[in-house]
Structures are given as C-alpha cells and as structure tokens.
Image (spheres, helix red, strand yellow):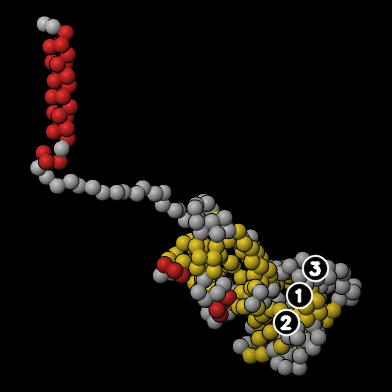
Amino acid sequence: MSRKVALRLTLASLLVLAFGAIAFASPTNRISNELDAKHTVFQESVHSTYQFSYEIPSEIAMGERRTFDVTLSYLDMGDIGYDFARVNVNIVEQPAPSSVELWATDDTGTYNLAEVGYWGPEGGFPIGKDYVATTSVEVVFHNTGQYSIELTLIDRADDDLVLVTSTITVDVVYPLTLSWNEDAFGSTSVGETITVNTTATRNTENPIERMYYVIEVYKDDDFATSDDVEAIGFGQDSEGKPLPSEGIPVAYSGTPGIFYFGDPGSGFTFTAEEVSTSFEITFNTPGEYQIKVWANQLPLD
C-alpha cells in the first residue's frame, strides 16, 4: 500500500470515529425526558439546654425572712438559645391555711412571685445559648408544714413548651421548739413540789424578739387559778445567762387558767441558741390537772 493510500485510510477512520461520537451524544437519540433537581444540605441549629440551681435550707422557721439565690444557666451549650423564655413559679404544695411570699426585684420593680406566678415579662425574654443569670429571692412562710415550689422554664413562642422544671421543697418549723421531761408528771400529794426541766431551742437565724411564754392550766376540766397552783423558774434566761438564785415566779394573769413567764406587754428577746429552765411547780389543791405551755410573739411593727 502506498503512503497516500494509508494516509487517506487513517483520515477516514478518524472522521468515522468523530461522527460516531457526535451521533451517540446527540439529543436526538434520547427516548425520555430529563430529570433535574437541586438539593441543599445544612446543619440544623440545636438549642442549648438549661438548669436551675439554688442553695436553700431544707428547714426554715415560720415567719422568718430568708434570702437565697436562684441561678438559671445553660447545661449543654447548643447553637442557639430562645427569644421568648419565661420562668413560671407555682406553689404546688403547702399546708392549709397558709401563704407564701417570694419577693424578687428587677429594673421594673419588686414582685411577689407567689402572686404573679412567673418571673420576667409576661411575653418572655431572650436567653442566649450561654445564658447565666442569678436572681435573689426573699422568702417568708406563714405556717408550719411542708412547702413545694415549682420553677418551670418555658418557651412562650412555642405554645409554652416546657424546657426544664425544678422543685424546691422546704419544711417550715416553729421559730422555737420546746421540750420537757414528761416523766416529772404523774401524781403527788397536796402541797408537794415537782421539778419540770424544760429546753427551748431557737430555729431561726436571728434572735426572736418580743416573745413570752403562756402556761394554761386546767383542774378537773375547768380553769385553775393561783390558789390551785404556783411555779417558779430557775436556770437560764433568754440569753443563756443564769437566772437569779431565788428564781422568777410564773405570773398569774388574773384570767382563770392563764399564767405567764415573761412580760406579756413587752416580751423579751431570745438570743441564745438553746436555753434550759427548771420549773418547781406546787399543787395546792387536789384534783386532776392538765398543763399546756407555748411561746407567743407580740407584733413587731
């Protein structure tokens, strides 16, 4: 084969291949429509989670004003927070009848959260993904018993979706706890003296002002008088200091059945943590006696 013939064959082959490739890619060979779509993949934003933290004694005295801090903070940090969060406050357990005061202050004023029912604007407030804020709350419980206060963080923008809930439980006790040796009581002869050892324990952080003791005495299901019974107190005063060696008489009020230890007009201030007092009680007439003792507090205002 000559060189010219070989060259023509080579060129012819290239042309066949080229036109074959063009024919293969040509739309005229399609037998269906073309499907075409776009799809975006993104990273979904995750909300932070949150928690309440606080330090409040498990036991508080009735009527005592105590202040504790409540902190709302993020627990696991996400990508975003919430724009319309609110803290609901609900007293879910309390003795009846009773009332609770929960006072908190912000730049708009001071509010009793137990009455308002929430903390923050009604429509909510923004909390960032790394939110941390502490609020001081002053609390007063007006009766003894167990109280439960529920704190709930909600998202107002999502039909009040609950984000986290925490419950504070407090046992409220009397400011003063009294005890005595019950075995001192039984039976005696007329004119015989018994000794009753009492202990008064203060349950408050601060001294108890304007208090006094009431002793109610019954004889044969009726009120006793100073002709029936008399008593003298020895031991410690309300500051824990010794009483006079001759003791302090328990005063008869003039009202049948009612005696006082301490001035019922002005009272005294109980500053000691614990006071021990012994009472020598003499029964001057025969009969069946019942004795009740408690502490009263005069108004402080």
Disc 3 marks a residue whose amino acid type is Ala
The reply to whether the C-beta atoms of the residues labelled 2 and 1 are less than 8 Å apart is yes
Q: Residues within 10 Å of mark 1 (few under 14, many from 20)?
A: some
Looking at the image, is mark 3 or mark 2 earlier in the sequence?
A: 3
Q: Which residue is mark 3?
A: 272
Residue at the top extreme of this rendering: 1
Pinpoint residue 37: horizontal percent, then vertical percent. Answer: 26, 49
Looking at the image, is mark 2 or mark 1 earlier in the sequence?
A: 1
Left/right placement of residue 236 relative to residue 79 reads right
User: From the image, which quarter does the N terminus lie in?
Assistant: top left
Which element type, helix, strand or loop, lies under badge 2?
strand
Examine the rendered structure and indicate whether residue 265 appears above or below residue 18: below
Distance CA(mark 3)–CA(mark 2): 16 Å
Pinpoint residue 301: horizontal percent, then vertical percent. Answer: 75, 86
**Res 20 → quadrant:** top left
| Residue 282 makes an appearance in the image | no
**Res 220 → quadrant:** bottom right
96 or 211, nearer to the observer: 96
Q: Residue at x 46, y 62 (%)?
A: 163
Q: Which residue is mark 2?
A: 297
Q: Residues within 10 Å of mark 3 (few under 14, many from 20)?
A: some
Pinpoint residue 134: horizontal percent, then vertical percent. Answer: 64, 63
Looking at the image, is mark 1 or mark 3 earlier in the sequence?
A: 1
Q: Which residue is mark 1?
A: 208
